Image (spheres, grey):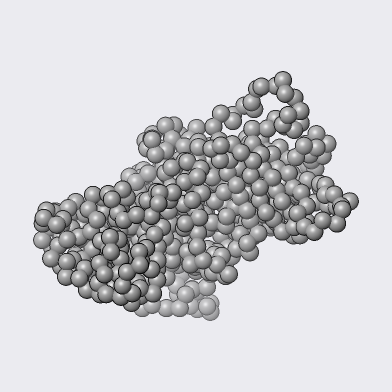
């Protein structure tokens, strides 16, 4: 970009900021242009992904606010929590009802306030578009949409009874939602393309339908009897051996209703995402209220939201919504087996791992190490603000600092090396474990080395050395340990964790030699990316392994052989 163009864009930006954003006519979509330099984007290599922000990999140490914290006055209770969290990204809604209360009149004053304050607090933003669907329902649509079933039809059951959920076949609904989303994307581009405050967009929220497998309206019935599109056939094999092509029932049998509904919703979302990205090409994702990852595969039985990007339907979203980059899980079960199984099902060669929502209770803290160690783009505990609202039992009973600070300790340790960690993750150098509910030891296979992680250990001595001691270490009454490791060279590692003990042993060719710690430095990375040693661990601090307490520290470890 030459200087003249840069000055012109800056002038236009300032001029736009000087005008009121209240009750204006919808702006004319800008002509799509090539991606601006350093604009946020998702890149992929060898099945690994990186979110590029300002030209380098970035890991989101995120915090998602409560649903109703998306107003300027409410932001006063958001920023203190974000600061205590040490988050680098805030996930926050923009509701259709708040930007287009009157049809055709758009108010982006909240968006402007949010962007300005986010920049002041030096955090990035992921905007959550609450449009046609939020948790499957229409409650965030404007009133002129909510109560006009004739223009904006709802789904119908087999008996013609109207459902709570807006139909994905509502042409006027799609047209209106798309118009509002395009106006939002155009406004973000005008206000933010030089700043990159907004780094990603969520399109709709936890879509699907509870209590009804699909739309049975006359229009839907006609579509249901048509042949399955070739793009879907190319992506999604039937769980049962049926026809290779034909109608939804002929191809998918008892899964047909769910998969047809999935395709209908995904196609609807694709139209919105495609139109938005034509204006401002930011990465976009959909989030998901989960089906049980451990239950045997079976057709829908009113046990999850049909039509959402559940693990068995990711392929349909890939086929129907190519402008959506990621299908992401929202995890609100602290069960360690279910948590890990969900990550396994969503982290795929064609789907980056990202956790846009998870519970904020103490039982979830340990999973930060597992998620970040697996190379996720980032994760965000839900409900991070100081509004004194608790979403227990999905989250913590506590509010305020007692809820935020356990996550904040981890983020504070990761923040100085967030860019390095994101780069290591993109290179496939990171690993992580979380203490499981059985409290058993876990191992990590590294290049030529093996890490053994144990929990509920005293800092001195091995288990069994003092059989008369029956006490257990403090603060280990619930599983809360975790460790993340980055192998930065053949014999060097960055280790970070809490409430755990780490041992590293040689796992390469056995040549009769024994491994030992070469050096264990506690320290941090400075703003220039240089390692700064604070002290070297030795003696009691290394004789029985590296003991990580409740305050996460960053260790730079070098191994050797003798």
Furthest-front residue in view? 241
- The reply, left or right, for residue 105 in relation to residue 350 is left
The quarter of the picture where residue 248 lies is: bottom left
Q: Is residue 147 above or below residue 227?
A: above
Furthest-top residue in view? 468
- The reply, left or right, for residue 386 in relation to residue 28 is right
Q: Nearer the viewer, residue 477 or 94?
A: 477
Residue 395 % position (x, y): 42, 38
> Would you say residue 466 is visible in this rendering?
yes
The quarter of the picture where residue 399 lies is: top left
Residue 136 % position (x, y): 28, 53
The quarter of the picture where residue 219 lies is: bottom left
Q: Which residue is painted at 57% across and 55% down in the image?
A: 374
Q: Nearer the viewer, residue 194 or 438?
A: 438
Residue 382 % position (x, y): 43, 44
> Would you say residue 290 is visible in this rendering?
no
Q: Which residue is painted at 34% across and 46% down in the image?
A: 67
Total numbered badges shown on the rendered structure: 0
Q: Is residue 390 above or below residue 327?
A: above
Residue 155 % position (x, y): 18, 58
- The reply, left or right, for residue 388 in relation to residue 213 is right
Q: Is residue 270 above or below residue 541?
A: below
Q: Which residue is painted at 30% across and 54% down in the image?
A: 300
Q: Nearer the viewer, residue 479 or 122?
A: 479
Q: Nearer the viewer, residue 33 or 340?
A: 340
Q: Is residue 134 above or below residue 243?
A: above
Q: Which residue is painted at 57% across and 70% down in the image?
A: 45
């Amino acid at each position: 970009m030459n200087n003249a163009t840069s000055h012109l864009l800056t002038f236009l930006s300032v001029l736009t900021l000087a005008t009121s954003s209240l009750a204006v006519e919808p702006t004319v979509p800008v002509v799509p242009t090539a991606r601006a330099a350093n604009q946020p984007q998702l890149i992929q290599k060898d099945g690994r992904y990186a979110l590029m922000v300002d030209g380098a990999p970035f890991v989101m140490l995120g915090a998602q606010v409560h649903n109703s914290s998306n107003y300027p006055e409410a932001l006063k209770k958001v920023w203190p929590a974000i600061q205590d969290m040490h988050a680098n990204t805030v996930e926050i809604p923009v509701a259709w009802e708040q930007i287009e209360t009157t049809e055709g009149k758009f108010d982006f004053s909240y968006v402007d306030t949010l962007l300005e304050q986010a920049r002041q607090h030096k955090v990035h933003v992921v905007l959550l578009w609450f449009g046609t669907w939020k948790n499957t329902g229409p409650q965030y649509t404007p009133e002129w949409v909510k109560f006009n079933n004739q223009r904006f039809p709802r789904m119908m059951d087999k008996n013609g009874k109207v459902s709570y959920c807006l139909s994905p076949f509502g042409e006027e609904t799609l047209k209106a939602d798309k118009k509002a989303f395009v106006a939002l994307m155009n406004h973000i581009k005008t206000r933010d393309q030089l700043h990159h405050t907004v780094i990603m967009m969520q399109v709709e929220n936890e879509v699907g339908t509870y209590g009804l497998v699909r739309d049975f309206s006359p229009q839907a019935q006609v579509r249901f009897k048509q042949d399955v599109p070739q793009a879907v056939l190319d992506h999604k094999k039937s769980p049962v051996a049926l026809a290779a092509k034909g109608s939804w029932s002929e191809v998918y049998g008892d899964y047909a209703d769910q998969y047809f509904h999935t395709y209908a919703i995904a196609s609807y979302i694709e139209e919105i995402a495609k139109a938005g990205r034509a204006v401002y090409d930011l990465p976009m994702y959909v989030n998901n209220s989960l089906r049980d990852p451990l239950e045997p595969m079976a057709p829908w039985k009113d046990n999850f939201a049909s039509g959402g990007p559940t693990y068995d339907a990711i392929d349909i979203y890939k086929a129907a919504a190519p402008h959506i980059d990621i299908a992401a899980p929202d995890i609100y079960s602290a069960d360690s087996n279910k948590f890990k199984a969900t990550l396994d099902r969503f982290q795929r060669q064609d789907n980056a791992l990202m956790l846009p929502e998870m519970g904020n209770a103490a039982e979830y803290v340990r999973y930060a190490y597992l998620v970040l160690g697996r190379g996720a783009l980032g994760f965000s505990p839900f409900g991070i603000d100081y509004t004194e609202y608790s979403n227990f039992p999905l989250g913590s009973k506590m509010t305020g600092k007692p809820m935020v600070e356990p996550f904040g300790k981890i983020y504070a340790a990761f923040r100085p090396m967030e860019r390095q960690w994101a780069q290591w993750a993109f290179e496939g150098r990171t690993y992580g474990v979380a203490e499981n509910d059985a409290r058993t030891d876990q191992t990590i296979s590294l290049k030529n080395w093996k890490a053994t992680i144990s929990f509920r250990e005293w800092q001195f001595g091995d288990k069994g050395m003092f059989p008369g001691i029956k006490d257990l270490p403090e603060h280990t009454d619930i599983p809360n340990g975790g460790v993340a490791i980055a192998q930065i060279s053949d014999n060097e590692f960055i280790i970070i964790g809490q409430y755990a003990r780490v041992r590293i042993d040689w796992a390469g060719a056995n040549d009769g030699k024994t491994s030992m710690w070469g050096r264990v430095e506690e320290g941090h990375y400075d703003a220039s990316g240089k390692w700064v040693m604070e002290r070297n661990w030795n003696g009691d601090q290394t004789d029985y392994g590296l003991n990580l307490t409740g305050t996460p520290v960053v260790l730079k470890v070098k191994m050797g052989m003798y």
